[in-house]
Amino acid sequence: MNDDRLPLSEEVFNQIVVRISEGDWVEGEKLPSESQLCEMFHVSRISVRAALQKLKGQGLITTKPGVGSFVCRPEKDNEPDGLLTQQIAGEAFREFFEFRQAIEFKAIELFVIHATKNDEEELKKALDGMFACGEDREQFAIYDRAFHMAIIRGSKNSFLYNAMENLEPIHRSYLAEVGRVTKKTNAQRYKEHKKLYEMLMKKKPGIVKERILDPDMCCDLSKY
């Protein structure tokens, strides 16, 4: 799994940062659409989304669901309050675990019914992104989220998607915490996600729901 190349999402992130710093895209300006960014940088939609997630996490852009992404100054005033800026832990971890379970389990059921070929391809691209990360846990977390969001997007239920997308900072913190405490390597976690992908392609939502929330975390929630 070792690969010294910079992940495509990181290259897109760096190029957008340069354009913002050079004034090509100024504060308040709407960024090009995801499809336009794909054409501009010659990358997949999943790489663009991962780059936008990182830009949002660093306060360089703000995203309005259904509208687009806008440039903003990376100041503390632009950061969400409370839990959104904190490392998720304790009772908050348990509560988000339950929330995620409610959202994703329904999304899995709907994905096998409504997902298009493009949705399946986006899911595969996220899986391939995990493989390309090697043992870089930060990059793996980006593609991990992209994988699960691809499932929710493929459900074709905008309420499920927006519910999770609006909690993007918490979702990232949750996945980072999972990555922090797990003893599994990225290679092992990739294999688990590959199995999820295979079961989704075989239209077996029951098996996916049994596996999709890390069994190790499920059994050890008592420490939170």
Image (cartoon, rainbow, N blue to C red):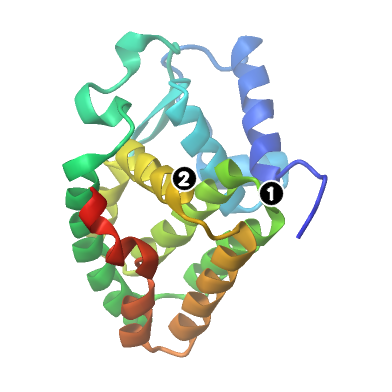
Residue wearing tag 1: 43
Q: Nearer the viewer, residue 71 or 95?
A: 95
Write the residue at 82% across / 45% down: 4
Q: Is residue 66 visible?
A: no
Q: Residue furthest right?
A: 4
Residue wearing tag 2: 180
Q: Nearer the viewer, residue 7 or 217?
A: 217
How crowded pointer 1 is (Cα within 10 Å; few <14, some 14-19, many 20+) is rated as some
In the rendered view, tell whether residue 162 sits above or below residue 6: below
| Image position, residue 17 (x, y; %) | 62, 21
Q: Which mark is residue 195?
A: none
| Image position, residue 55 (x, y; %) | 51, 29
Write the residue at 30% across / 28% down: 86
Query: Taking 129 as reference, is 98 left or right?
Result: left
In the rendered view, tell whether residue 107 sits above or below residue 181: below
Write the residue at 38% across / 79% down: 208
| Image position, residue 169 (x, y; %) | 34, 36
CA–CA distance in space, label 2 to label 1: 29 Å
Q: Is residue 13 visible?
A: yes
Q: Are marks 2 and 1 in contact (CB under 8 Å)?
A: no
Q: Secondary structure at mark 1?
A: loop
Tell me which numbered mark, 2 or 1, is placed earlier along the sequence.
1
Q: Amino acid at mark 2?
A: Arg
Location of residue 161 by image quarter? bottom left
